[in-house]
Image (cartoon, coloured by chain):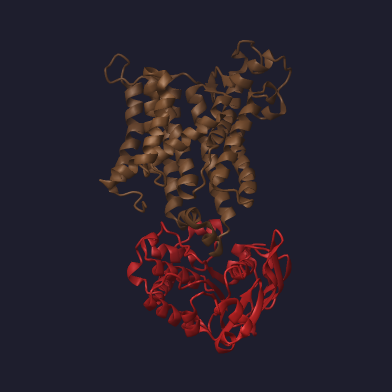
Chain colours: A red, B brown
Amino acid sequence: MKARDLPEVEVAHDTVLYLDGVTVSFDGFKALNNLSLLIDAGELRCVIGPNGAGKTTMMDVITGKTRPDEGKALFGQSTDLTRLSEAEIAHAGIGRKFQKPTIFEQLTVFENLELAMKADKQVRATLLAKLSSAEKDRIAATLEQIGLERASDDVAGLLSHGQKQWLEIGMLLMQEPKLLLLDEPVAGMSDQETERTAALFLSLAGTHSLVVVEHDMAFIETIARKVTVLHEGSVIAEGPMEQVKNDPRVIEVYLGR
Amino acid sequence: MIRRLYGPRGWAILGAGAFAAFVLFPVLNLAVPPDSAFHLSAFWVTLAGKIMCYAIVALALDLVWGYAGILSLGHGLFFALGGYAMGMYLMRQIGREGQYQSELPDFMVFLDWKELPWQWWGSEHFLWAMALVVLVPGLLAFVFGYFAFRSRVKGVYFSIITQALTFAAMLLFFRNNTGFGGNNGFTDFKRILGFSITSPETRMSLFVLTALILVSTLLLARWIVTSKLGRVLEAIRDAEPRAMFCGYDTVHYKLAIFTLSAVLCGIAGALYVPQVGIINPGEMSPANSIEIAIWVAVGGRGTLAGAILGAGLVNGAKSFFTVAFPEYWLFALGAIFILVTLFMPRGVLGLLQRK
């Protein structure tokens, strides 16, 4: 199936992502064990859990990098994520930020955003692509949103760690995704940068659905509305931050340490 | 990062090179009488023509290695296949003028074959031979690349497999019953398109044609790397997973550039064989393909111009060494590679640009 032929994913209804009984095992070790998760449209969901709880594997399943042994992964009403390639899933509207910022280090900030921009991404179309003024405006708007308008022509590899994180978030936004997966987005950021990132996420929620995996509890508390706690590949608690924080099982496996 | 590709100075150098190839060489070789001090002998024309063929190969490798980050150590194979396709046509052009005065190429008579094997079908037609020059390397690269890239073979593993591929092909072509002249390959060509292959005019025509194709290849490659496609290739080189999650099907991209690169090598091989007058399986030896990578590394990868420069410098040095100190050439080559890797990671061009 060609990526561009995919039907538009319908997210006007409630659910944008639906994982049901997902199990992934690596040589007998169950990275995900019957995991179920439901993300509503426009929701900002935080996912926490100790190391090895399966947070990154969960993202791998959603983005097509890892295929589940069992279970369903649906995007919108009907898009079966377990059957699509990474590129097709990206076209369908899921953007992913990695744990370690991955940007195109040798290209400029502007070019990074240009490549990420939603467009026909077949080889021939890319060879003949010309930037329209509307597209340039979009890149400029995103540069402003992520606070990198002055760094537009800088080589991305020379940015500070926090700026790289923002650039990567900006690249996700250029893809016009419906669902953003953010793996430790504030790792290595200063307090001020973290604050700005929190503001950015809150402004995105509503128009986008966001799933944030993070270790920084202070950050989670500023943005969290609903929190999911993973442990050994399964959900052990889910609800508002206050409730989760006081859950005895959560305290035992994670917060108490 | 070289975004400039190229400033006014670059274009001036390209213009000067084109002038030398299209005007200076023909005039000095053909119009100036042989006894004049300004006469350019056939030796230099052939040497320069040969190096230009190598430069096309280096450009082709720079596209896949310098830009897309795929280090192919099997590009010599594509070059040789293009050469063999041209060689088949040249063998058929010999007609009955071979040693055995047979319609069949000499080596077939020698092997006591009574008719042409199936691979030789249509080889007397120039256009079919030209189609093979493009199709054989292109198809092989496409099929090989499809399986390699789809299985996500990358980095040093890809390099090793390409070495194995060219080695396997060399062993295959060494066999007499493969039908391509075994270890002797093809030689003793007489004519191309009916013109004597050794006449000064034919030699100069081939030289000018090679220069024309080298310049076209450079412009084509420049167009590709300055387009958005070029930036996607660099993106794949620097962070392939990110490129995939941006929605680029990286297999298609790698396959496209790898196949194009192989086709360019095939064309270079087809230009090389009539000028040098021989093609044999030695061209497929793994060391040959490694040498191509050295040209690109010496010149400076990811710059295009560096590939041409590197091919010129290394082969110029090789011509000098193999005449002056034949036994030391491989040592010199190794030393060049080590020195460049240690002290000039961006190659000679990187060194020039810093100033």
Instruction: Name the foreground residue: A65 vs B236.
Output: A65
Q: In this view, does B270 lie above or below B197?
A: below
The count of marks equals: 0
Q: Can residue A210 be seen in this view?
A: no
Q: In this view, does A11 lie above or below B54?
A: below
Quarter of the image for residue B338 reads top left
Quarter of the image for residue A83 reads bottom right
Quarter of the image for residue B96 reads top right
What percent of the width, then of the height, locates residue B255?
Answer: 58, 49
Residue sitting at x 59%, y 71% = A55
What percent of the width, then of the height, locates residue B340?
Answer: 37, 38
Q: Quadrant of the C terminus of chain B?
A: top left
> Which residue lies most toward the left here?
B355
Residue sitting at x 55%, y 79% = A255
Left/right of residue B284 with respect to residue A105 in the rendered view:
right
What percent of the width, then of the height, locates residue A218?
Answer: 46, 81
Instruction: Name the foreground residue: A120 vs B210.
Output: A120
Q: Is residue B68 above or below residue A146?
A: above
Instruction: Name the foreground residue: B101 vs A67.
Output: A67
Q: Can residue B255 be seen in this view?
A: yes
What percent of the width, then of the height, locates residue B258?
Answer: 55, 45
Left/right of residue B73 with respect to residue A196 in the rendered view:
right
Instruction: Name the foreground residue: A201 vs B172.
Output: A201
